[in-house]
Amino acid sequence: MFNKLIEYDINPLIIFNEKGEVVYCNQEAEIFLSSQNIKEIFDFAITNAPKTGIKTKFEKIKFNNIEFNGYSILIDEKLAIRFFIDTTPTNYSLSNLEKIDIAMLIDFVCDIFTLKGNFNIKKYYDPTIPEFYSDKNEIIRLLKNLITANSYVTTKVIIGESIIIDNKKYPLIEITIENFNDININSTTYEIKKQDNKISIKIPLIQGVE
């Protein structure tokens, strides 16, 4: 169980040997390292490492276009570094939102792909989800980057979860994509979570704005 928690942690974990070679990285770190200079990450870890034990620091760190909220570095027989992803959406706002039908929006994105070639995208929509207000352009951007030729896209209302925006509580819906385009994508508007062969986008169900 512990190994699975580490492997599917949304925070990148990297372990180096004394030569600066990666001897282990979890799935999130593998995606992160695919677009980075590994020596730069190793040098950062060495420069900021404690003499012994573990050091944790919360500050903004940026590698190319990827930003983290902090890190932990552990020195033992090897050197381990774990970066902290900011999972708190910062751009939730009730202004400049458009009323959308989420099923129609997903169909629109899927139709774009279908026109380009032989796509076999399967879909299942929760019929209880009403029209609601959201950042349509951001949802389209995420879907266009994540959907592949063989994706399975579903929607549902998340039971028992909600979010507070401007002191008001809103339920959440979730778009889940199986067989997704596994790229390093994030959003400051919506929470994105990867697990196994699925990726989910959590969106507030805002049915009215003042």
Image (cartoon, rainbow, N blue to C red):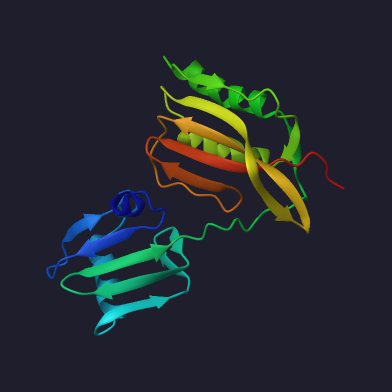
Residue 200 vs residue 189, the one in the foreground: 200
| Quadrant of the image occupied by residue 21 | bottom left
Q: Position of residue 78 (x, y in %)?
A: 18, 70
Q: Position of residue 178 (x, y in %)?
A: 44, 30
Answer with left or right where residue 155 lies relative to residue 84: right
Residue found at the far top of this picture: 118
Q: Where is residue 3 in the image (x, y as percent from the top left)?
A: 28, 52
Residue found at the far front of this picture: 1
Residue 167 visible somewhere in the drawing: yes
Q: Which residue is drawn at 19% across and 65% down?
A: 16
Residue found at the far left of this picture: 19
Q: Which residue is drawn at 26% across and 67% down?
A: 80
Residue found at the far right of this picture: 210
Compared with residue 87, is residue 52 higher up or lower down, i.e. above or below? below
Q: Which residue is drawn at 39% across and 60% down?
A: 64
Compared with residue 180, is residue 23 higher up or lower down, i.e. above or below? below
Answer with left or right where residue 51 lies relative to residue 193: left
Answer with left or right where residue 53 lies relative to residue 178: left
| Quadrant of the image occupied by residue 133 | top right
| Quadrant of the image occupied by residue 52 | bottom left
Q: Where is residue 127 in the image (x, y as percent from the top left)?
A: 68, 22
Residue 30 visible somewhere in the drawing: no
How many discs appear? 0
